[in-house]
Amino acid sequence: GAIEIDPTDMKARYILGLSLFAQRRFTPETIGYLKHVEEQFPNARLALAQIAAQTGKVDEARAELTAYISSPGAEQRSQAEQMLSRLR
């Protein structure tokens, strides 16, 4: 069943999205949570890129990685750059 959280609570959406991602539940719900918070939490883009790459959406993965690498909060920039080079 669906979990209901306050739609304005970005941190809760981020944590829930990452939890579902960690469980390899690459559902529209997971993607929605992560897309909703990717501006506030840049690492959400990295998770979205990995989901896209693993589900065969290479162009989408490249776009998320490029956005992640250029974001100021990209803590795992070198990992993202390596992933991007493997997708070229």
Image: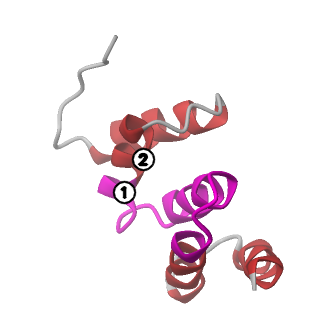
Residue 20, percent across and down?
53, 31
Indicate left or right for 5 with 43 as reference.
left
Residue 11, quarter of picture: top left
Q: Which residue is mark 2?
A: 31
61 lies above or below 85: above
Q: How many marks?
A: 2
Residue shown at the point (18%, 31%) measured from the top left: 6
Coloring basis for residues: secondary structure
Q: Main secondary structure of the magenta part?
A: helix
Q: Amino acid at mark 1?
A: Lys
Indicate left or right for 10 with 26 as reference.
left
Q: In the depicted view, which residue is nearer to us: 23 or 43?
A: 23
Residue 26, percent across and down?
54, 39
Q: Which residue is mark 1?
A: 35
Which stretch is magenta? 35-61
Report if the CB atoms under discs 1 and 2 are less than 8 Å apart.
yes
Label 1: state its secondary structure: helix
Residue 6 badge: none
- Name the quadrant of the C terminus: bottom right
- Name the quadrant of the N terminus: top left
Q: Residues within 10 Å of mark 2 (few under 14, many from 20)?
A: many
24 lies above or below 58: above
